[in-house]
Image: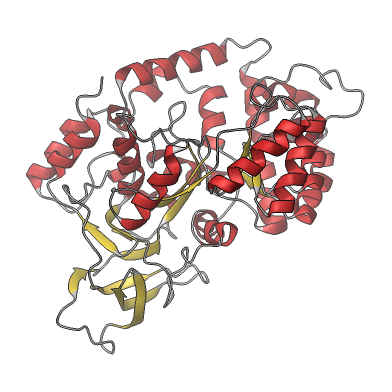
Amino acid sequence: MARHTAVLNLAAAITARALAAKRTASVLLSLVVLTPAATPAFADTAIVNVNVIPMTEEVVQSAQTVLVAGGRIEAIGPVDELPVPETYTLVDGTDRYLIPGLGEMHAHVPPAGSGSLDRILALFAVNGVTTIRGMLGHPSHLELRGELDSGQRFGPRLVTSGPSLNGNSVTGAADGRRQVEAQHAAGYDFIKIHPGLEAREFAAIAETANALGMPFVGHVPVSVGVRGALSAGIASIEHLDGYMAAMLPKHADGAGGYGGFFGVLLADNVDIGQLEALVADTEAAGTWNVPTQTLIEQLIDATPVADLTTRTEMACMPPATVRAWADAKTQMQAERDLHAELAARAIAIRRQLIRELHARGNRLLLGSDAPQVFNVPGFSAHRELELYVAAGLTPYEALATGTRDVARFLGLETGRIEVGQLADLVLLDENPLEDIRNLTRVHGVMLGGRWHSKRVLLQKLDELCSGQE
């Protein structure tokens, strides 16, 4: 179903939907309301007569029953052949589509104790995001990770980096080594790189992380450049950082100068003929990319600020946050040398890079950078996937970046609907392979084998999106 285009208050839209008791969505991105109160324990569940999109290949397996027990997929088979034990909870999958849960690979997670934590985690989950990679780590995330895995706290599976290593937090090569060793000993999953590191500091961090078998991910230091980061073994590059600068001719006017937000001001100087070799180098290095394209496009394109602030999902964020996001967009539009034609060229180059990175090695990972400017958790993952399709990927290829490929990168037993896999699943009302926007038509979510169906819509909406201050 096409996205609702009327500018509506989110609460009013959901209220109308609840009163009408319709199955069809009437709110932008079809915000799903999940079971309130305590997260349920594992329950044996049968999703019956459902169309399965397994993400092992581009196919729809119709009229299937999927049995889940102990947090894993126990059996899959034709509805008229696979018996359902009497003790199993039944979920009607008729005319619906079952996919693996989505992974948001660039999330910012508040510390435990933050007043916004549970709301942000829930917003991811209700949109079908069942795994998030926290990219601005905090010591409290180590305990939070376990709470989410066990179901003590409602939300997606958490993979976490430690506090970022950057030009302000690292005071030399020896300190960089020490911090990597400390984060490894603490049990973080990744090292996060932020800007400002000197070349020798980055080298020390990379060498130590590689020796410990701990992936390092993030921004590309200007002192190193993309090819330096690739050769050092960076596991994933965020925001396509450094690629614009890497495609500058040696003596271009913009070389070594001020590039603006992720190099967008360099777009007129880029030698697009270098893109193929750069993509080949990325493939050879085995490095993945997390584009966060929606973050960049929303900030630099010509969409009016008012159109962004009145998106219905903005009701889920505090008004002060939305105002700050509007200010950021206004300031970006006033950036020196930025104009509509340059922004359009930068967007086109980035989309071509996304398309070529996928075509060459399938090493793209879904990530939108949420909650950041106009990126409401969960909702922005859907918008990000739409941009991958706009860049030239098919809906199946885009969906793979947030399911099968996330699991491949993280080494998780998720991302595919197969017997034995962890049961992180999303039930949709429409087929996302026909239209990627159908990912917003969430009917229910299974987090680690715990099924969450639609319940009192207005109650859950009030919990997540009302009374923000």
Relative image position of residue 343 (x, y in whole percent): 63, 24
Residue 93 vs 345, above or below: the answer is below
Relative image position of residue 205 (x, y in whole percent): 73, 39
Q: How is the image coloured?
A: secondary structure
Quadrant of res 171: top right
- From the viewer's perspective, is 175 left or right of 365? right
Q: Nearer the viewer, residue 449 or 138?
A: 138
Give the residue furthest to the left: 19
Relative image position of residue 11 (x, y in whole percent): 18, 32
Residue 312 vs 446, above or below: the answer is above
Can the viewer see residue 220 in this picture? no
Give the residue furthest to the bottom: 81
Relative image position of residue 261 (x, y in whole percent): 64, 23
Q: Residue at x 47, y 68 (%)?
A: 416
Residue 336 vs 232, above or below: the answer is above
Q: Nearer the viewer, residue 218 or 431?
A: 218
- From the viewer's perspective, is 188 left or right of 110? right
Give the residue furthest to the right: 251
Quadrant of res 102: bottom left
Image quadrant in which the C terminus is located? top left
Residue 339 vs 296, above or below: the answer is above
Q: Nearer the viewer, residue 114 or 120?
A: 114
Can the viewer see residue 95 in this picture? yes
Figure label count? 0
